[in-house]
Amino acid sequence: LALTAILISFTSCKKEEGCTDPNATSYDSEAVLDDGSCTYQGEVVFWYGQSTSEGMIDFDSNSLTFYVDGAVVGSTSSSVYWTSAPDCGDNASITVTENLGNVKSRSLTYSVEDQDGYVLWSDIANFEANSCQEIELVW
């Protein structure tokens, strides 16, 4: 009987390994020891206001295509604008979610082109773990 109690005590005290960072997409609330398996994702939302929208329309840029790291991530009409920064994932927003692997931040290039392939903006987007970064495009 005493041996059984000792065995139960040892097995119930076993420390489970896993991801202990609550900001990670792979967070394990039962893990006590971090085993290096944490993975992260970050988001960026692109937006512009009315004056930028009007500037693009005056420039005959009517349709926009957004690229991150060379891949198309969204498109919209230049006449669609925001009065303030949208939240990531808001309806009609250009939100990009990037899987960061086991790092907490990553910088990737982005560009925005009009319907004629003219690059209106090109810069670096910083994706941070468990965060929504706002990038305002200004004319």
Image (cartoon, grey):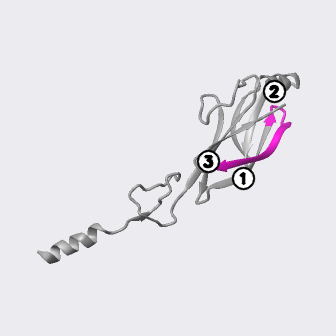
Q: Residues within 10 Å of mark 2 (few under 14, many from 20)?
A: some
| Helix, strand or loop status at disc 3 | strand
Of residues 9 and 101, which is closer to you in this image? 9
Q: Is residue 107 visible?
A: yes
Q: Where residue 138 sits in the image (x, y, percent)?
A: 81, 32
Which range is magenta?
Answer: 113-128
Q: Where residue 134 sits in the image (x, y, percent)?
A: 69, 38
Q: Earlier in the sequence, mark 2 or mark 3?
A: 3
Write down the residue under mark 1: 107
The quadrant where residue 62 appears: top right
| Helix, strand or loop status at disc 2 | helix
- Disc ID at residue 42: 3
Q: What residue lies at 52% left-to-right and 59% top-to-bottom?
A: 38
| Helix, strand or loop status at disc 1 | strand
CA–CA distance in space, label 2 to label 1: 25 Å
Q: What residue lies at 62% left-to-right and 56% top-to-bottom?
A: 104
- Residue found at the far bottom of this picture: 3
Q: Residues within 10 Å of mark 1 (few under 14, many from 20)?
A: few
